[in-house]
Image (cartoon, rainbow, N blue to C red):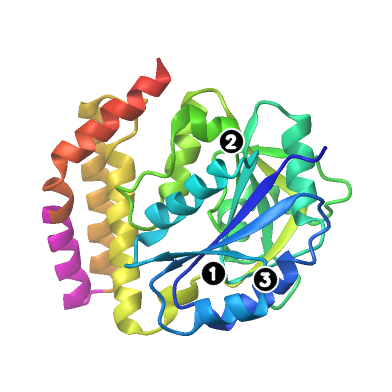
Amino acid sequence: MAPSVAVIILNYQGRRWLEACCESVFATEYASFHVFLVDNASDDGSVEFVRERFPQVDVILNQTNCGFSEGNNIGIRAALKAGADYVVLLNPDTRVTPRWLAELIEVGESEPGAGILGAVQLEYEGEEFNTWTKTALPQHLDELRTPETARRWIPVEWVEGACFAVKRRVIEDVGLLDPIYFAFYEEIDLCRRAACRGWKVALVPRCRIHHLRGGSWTADDVIKRERDYRCDRSQFIYNLTEPRRTLTANFAWYFITLGTKVKEVAGSFSAERAWDLVRLQFDVLGSCGSLIAKWRRDRSLTN
């Protein structure tokens, strides 16, 4: 019997992508999967559209925008309660190919140590690699161009949350996405925690999806500024909580990260960007208690 898979689509103001996303998902060539739409308080008609057009989808409504981590966690809890063997996080601004899911699960089942699996990402409207694939996987691009001759899976440090398959046993072993991240780095953090417990992260060359990237974060300049702030914040948190380093070493990494950000601001100065970097320091350093608690919690996974 094929493992049971829950596909979780976390949505916020994503109505314009949901039809193409859901149509491609329901054209998936896999025997046993169920789709959850977790909506983070959208007001663009997303929920109404999905309920009318795709009634087979389980819709979970959040009263507020819970962010990527906790929004997906709500879906993951529902999926595990329903008995899913695998949970797959999928962005609404994606279109999947027919065998995307079969390729992921076949690798997961053939490789017991592979706990997290991800797709090769193509441009939303084309067949070229998108920016994530080109930026995160430059050393593998030649191999990925011919998936029929590529390895069945490639060990990597992390895969992006746009298409992120996790075995149930991994979640039970290391926990859910950490809500200390509202958005960005949460999937990298989960890959890091899984690695601390000996799980492998696998890129599956024959699993292909089309991903626009950015989604609702590109709506206007205000939202783009918020995106940059959230991304910088998460990067500081990630570097400050590396469980395989000491607290002292992590604090040194804080200054390395800060120096990098200062150079970025100086290179293309704007008062808004400079102010955001200043207030970010108060935000991050004001959370020292939570960061130390996370470091200790994650460090226990390395024992």
Residue behind mark 1: 213
Observer-side mark, 3 or 1, equals 3
Q: Position of residue 225 (x, y in %)?
A: 30, 74
Q: Which mark is residue 22?
A: 3
Which quadrant is the N terminus positioned in?
A: top right
For badge 1, the amino acid type reads Arg
Kindly report the secondary structure that dominates the magenta region of the rendered protein: helix
Residue 197, relative to residue 34: is it above or below?
above
Q: Position of residue 219 (x, y in %)?
A: 41, 83
Label 2 to label 3: alpha-carbon separation: 23 Å
Residue at 21% x, 77% y is 270
Residue behind mark 2: 168
Q: Are marks 2 and 1 in contact (CB under 8 Å)?
A: no
Question: Magenta segment, which residues?
Answer: 269-282
Q: Which mark is residue 194?
A: none
- The number of numbered badges drawn on the structure is 3
Label 3 to label 1: alpha-carbon separation: 17 Å
Residue at 33% x, 51% y is 181
